[in-house]
Image (tube, helix red, strand yellow):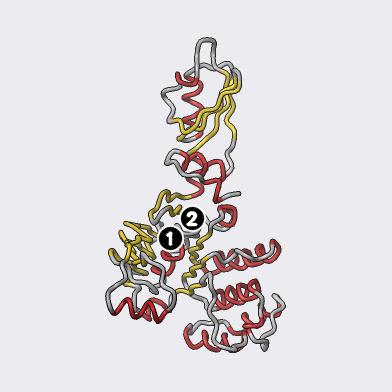
């Protein structure tokens, strides 16, 4: 049974106007704006982005800072209205649609809490917004995470605030959850604990997350599909399992008089030479790679598994993109 498209981002673009000149104060800005003395440059945070998420998908949005990840999530959450295109969830436009917004929880990179609120008071606030909010589970998780329900949130550390945001989001029991750099700033133990929470709800109630991160390793063990944002556009959007099954590294020693350039039947992404040993990275299934290599009758060959990092490096180097900045 095929999945149904749940979230559709259809050819959206988002433009911001950035001031060309430095303004010393808000008062100065207002005065110059009234007099129309400020000139602006247009900046397209997103351009012609199309993306489809099916129910039950586990989607990662990967990109460097400034690539457009936060803008993408804010637009998907209906906070920003695209200048072009549209975003729908379960067939309905998201912008200014409270019914649709009740289907997801958005965890911003900069968490927002009511002034002087405690975790218990934030729970009451969200319980009024999300009718399926699990109060019992929330207080159980607060205890598990060693967070005091009566302590003022503004006294929490950044990591504690992120933990609280995750607990509120998970306990809201929404169909979808949007996360902006949610794992950033958490220590390794807490990061794995939070990921386990997501994994449990994805398995138990088919929660569909969209997780934005600047780090591929943060997404690898929780997402099954990754889109790479670069300069406001989608450079790459692929299922991780498909990527692993359709790109391979082959080490071989060819017959006398043959070179890597003779392997014309392969769709080669990368070629390396060390003496007689040739290493090529190719597209296609393992069966295709074996069949083609055997047709060249090499002295020796071996197909070596690629890590996800190596696959992304191979895929993006073709487009001239340095994926290493997103890994190391």
Q: Where residue 325 sits in the image (x, y, percent)?
A: 55, 49
Q: Nearer the viewer, residue 131 or 266?
A: 266
Q: Nearer the viewer, residue 53 or 311?
A: 311
Q: Nearer the viewer, residue 93 or 61?
A: 61
Q: Which mark is residue 95?
A: none
Helix, strand or loop at mark 2: loop
Query: Is residue 302 placed above or below 242 in the rendered structure?
Result: above
**Residue under numbered circle 1:** 68
Query: Is residue 276 placed above or below 113 in the rendered structure?
Result: above
Q: Where residue 3 sits in the image (x, y, percent)?
A: 40, 59
Q: In percent of the image, x 52 and y 35: which residue is there? A: 248
Q: Rounded to the nearest whole Å, what is the CA distance between mark 2 and mark 1?
A: 8 Å
Q: Is residue 157 left or right of residue 166?
A: right
Q: Quadrant of the N terminus?
A: bottom left
Q: Residues within 10 Å of mark 1 (few under 14, many from 20)?
A: many
Q: Where residue 214 sits in the image (x, y, percent)?
A: 53, 57
The picture quadrant where one finds residue 90 is bottom left
Q: Is residue 83 left or right of residue 28?
A: left
Q: Where residue 28 sits in the image (x, y, percent)?
A: 39, 78
Query: Is residue 292 placed above or below 115 in the rendered structure?
Result: above
Q: Nearer the viewer, residue 122 or 30?
A: 30
Q: In percent of the image, x 49 and y 32: which residue is there? A: 270
Helix, strand or loop at mark 1: loop
Query: Is residue 65 placed above or below 251 in the rendered structure?
Result: below
The picture quadrant where one finds residue 250 is top right
Q: In percent of the image, x 50 and y 14: which residue is there? A: 258
Q: Residues within 10 Å of mark 2 (few under 14, many from 20)?
A: many
Sequence-wise, which precedes: disc 2 or disc 1? 2
The picture quadrant where one finds residue 161 is bottom right
**Residue under numbered circle 2:** 63
In contact (CB < 8 Å): disc 2 and disc 1: yes
């Amino acid at each position: 049974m095929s999945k149904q498209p749940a979230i559709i981002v259809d050819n959206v673009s988002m433009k911001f106007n950035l001031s060309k000149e430095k303004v010393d104060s808000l008062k100065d800005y207002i005065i110059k704006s009234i007099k129309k003395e400020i000139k602006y440059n247009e900046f397209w945070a997103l351009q012609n982005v199309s993306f489809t998420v099916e129910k039950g998908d586990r989607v990662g949005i990967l990109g460097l800072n400034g690539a457009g990840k936060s803008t993408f999530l804010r637009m998907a959450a209906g906070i920003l209205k695209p200048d072009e295109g549209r975003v729908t969830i379960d067939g309905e436009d998201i912008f200014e649609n409270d019914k649709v917004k009740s289907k997801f929880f958005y965890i911003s990179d900069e968490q927002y809490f009511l002034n002087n609120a405690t975790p218990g008071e934030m729970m009451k606030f969200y319980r009024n917004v999300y009718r399926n909010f699990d109060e019992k589970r929330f207080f159980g998780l607060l205890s598990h995470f060693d967070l005091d329900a009566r302590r003022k949130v503004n006294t929490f550390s950044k990591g504690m605030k992120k933990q609280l945001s995750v607990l509120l989001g998970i306990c809201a029991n929404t169909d979808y959850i949007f996360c902006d750099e949610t794992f950033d700033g958490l220590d390794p133990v807490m990061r794995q604990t939070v990921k386990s929470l997501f994994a449990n709800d994805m398995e138990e109630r088919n929660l569909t997350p969209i997780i934005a991160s600047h780090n591929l390793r943060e997404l690898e063990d929780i997402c099954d599909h990754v889109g790479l944002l670069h300069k406001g556009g989608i450079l790459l959007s692929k299922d991780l399992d498909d990527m692993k099954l359709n790109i391979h590294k082959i080490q071989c020693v060819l017959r006398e008089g043959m070179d890597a350039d003779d392997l014309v039947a392969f769709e080669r992404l990368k070629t390396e030479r060390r003496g007689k040993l040739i290493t090529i990275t190719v597209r296609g299934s393992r069966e295709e790679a074996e069949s083609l290599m055997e047709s060249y009758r090499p002295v020796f060959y071996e197909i070596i598994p690629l890590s996800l990092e190596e696959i992304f490096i191979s895929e993006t180097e073709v487009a001239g993109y340095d994926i290493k900045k997103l890994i190391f």
